[in-house]
Amino acid sequence: MKYCPSLFAASRRLAREVVVGDVGLGGTHPIRVQSMLTCDTMDTAACMQQTEDLVKVGCEIVRITAPTVKDAANLEHIVAGLRARGITVPIVADIHFKPEAALEAAKWVEKVRINPGNYADKKRFDIREYTDAQYASELERIREKFVPLVELCKARSVAMRIGTNHGSLSDRIMNRYGDSPLGMVESALEFARIARDCDYHAFVFSMKASNPKVMIAAYRLLIARLNDLGADWNYPVHLGVTEAGDGEDGRIKSAIGIGSLLADGIGDTIRVSLTEDSVHEIPVARALVHEIAVAAGAEALESGLPTAYDPYEYHRRDAGQVNVQGFSLGGTDLLRVALCKAQHAVLLEKIQGGIDPGEYRPEIVAEDLSVLEVDPREISKVAALHSETSPRLVSVPDGIELNPVHAFRLLAAHLDPRHPILLKDTLTPAEPPANSLEALLRSSAVLGSLICDGIGDAIFVRNEKSPGAALRLGYNILQAAGARIFKTDYVACPSCGRTLFNLQETTARIKEATSHLKGVKIAIMGCIVNGPGEMADADFGYVGGAPGKINLYVGKNAVKFNIPESEAVMRLKDLIAEHGKWVDPAASAT
């Protein structure tokens, strides 16, 4: 089962063409960039203005939530107003729970997004066993609800996204496949089969999760399943890490998930989901496509070579241990951050001068490492390491004509597993990125992708020249990839018309109150749609339950209900304390 022709070279996957309004997806079309409105769908003027603002910064497809039939009906006025202004960008209606809202929206928009996990399904998860007959009955119930939408979209030439979310799988899927990438894929395929039975093919898949490892595995598994099903299952895919958060952390997490797949030739349209104003998503998405996406027609390298990892399930490569500069690398040891000697010296001088670096402390000096660099294409030289009696720290030399992701995968495939690997974010350090965003995206996509493959025991950050920024970037890549948790971790969704509180302001308040809680993971969700599921690996959750009211969660379980928003942050702190994870912040130095 393969999701791309080769893990050691990339060529863009050729998907069938799906047309959304006047924008083509798949085929030879460029990778499209899209975003979503944050305002109330009933506020026609605000929706038109936000759409116009997005188009001005390069957004090619705009999504608007339609949680009710009333919201869906107002899409008529929004679309008519935009067209009267000469704005032709395709509009996508985002649907959860209500098939009748989807049927109304499909009258007015160019595309409808449905979530298989909650289309015509209830919000509450039931723990039960489904017999084959019961499961078939559930599918027939879904078919009855879904076919009318398919037929309407087919008649009106409206496209569709079958968009699975890790956070909102149905009880039918959860009980049979679990909360897993396989469950995400099977959920989407159930709906795709119904669409195909109606001879409807104008649809796109997505497999979104807030955890980049889960997201990457789900998309890979989806493409592998589509390949196995046959050549006519080559539907386009929309990429995104949902609930990525804000600031540098949100950009890094998005670059890891989206960048990893783009580097393997997967993806026809993308959205970067930030807890910020939507216009800030577009420059990040456009930069990702420019920096990472691969062209069609690249020649595969050693496509038949066995991999050193399972691309569908994360396992860290089991390397031997080496001791360097007071740190142990390999095995189950923490991944460490290496900097060049000059950067390391600057940071040490600042620390000695009394500047507290907080959690970002310099660790390894790259030039002082006893690292053996081997071109992974020179198999005899790599094989010579097999006779080494002790583990050696190994890396790839600069200047070779390989993408660093493919180079390190190839090295891991040939290298005896007992030798740990030092990852580099670039093999051409003399060609630095033009700006800090490009540096962040390149480093995150390369290092994060490899870490999510289970490859690497230390990372060397070279795209960012500022010592402090390079160190912070290295640490934050490890955190976003789930390799090393050293600070409070946040899962925060982007705002939309379903959101029941101001996400940006609330996220800032929660971070101000909790950012000192090292290792605690907090989810901040504007509504119930993806909340419980995306909090699967969070310790605590803050979720909009009703206007002005907040529900608090421990893991996926709601434990406090209808808390006034003015009290909710304090009550969250109390909940964290109840579970023994609260510590008071250290007193500020005076």
Image: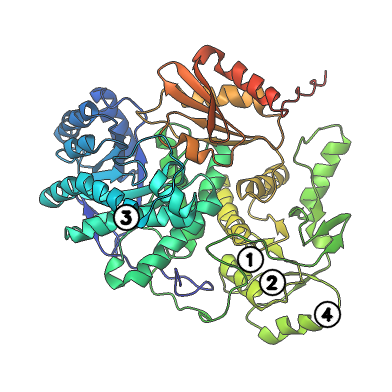
Q: Which mark is residue 133?
A: 3
Q: CA distance from mark 2 to mark 4?
A: 20 Å
Find the residue positioned furthest to the bottom.
380
The reply to whether the C-beta atoms of the residues labelled 1 and 3 are less than 8 Å apart is no
Dot placed on the residue nearer the N-terminal end, 4 or 1: 4
Q: In the structure shown, which secondary structural element does the residue marked by tag 2 occupy?
A: loop
Residue 397 shows which numbered tag?
Answer: 2
Q: Is the residue 431 above or below the residue 79 in the image?
A: below
Q: Amino acid at mark 2?
A: Pro
Quarter occupied by the N terminus: bottom left
Q: Mark 4 or 3, which is nearer the eye?
A: 3
Q: Amino acid at mark 4?
A: Glu
The one of 403 and 490 positioned closer to us in this rendering: 490
- Give the Cα distance between marks 4 and 1: 26 Å
Pointer 4 residue: 388
Q: Which mark is residue 427?
A: 1
Mark whose residue sits in front, 2 or 4: 4
Q: State how far apart marks 2 and 1 are (Cα).
A: 7 Å
> Sequence-wise, which precedes: disc 2 or disc 1?
2
Q: Is residue 106 above or below residue 341?
A: above
Sequence-wise, the earlier of marks 4 and 3 is: 3
Q: How far separated are the C-alphas under marks 4 and 3?
A: 59 Å
Name the element at disc 1.
loop
In the rendered structure, which amino acid carries the disc numbered 3? Ala
**Comparing marks 4 and 1, which lies closer to the viewer?**
4
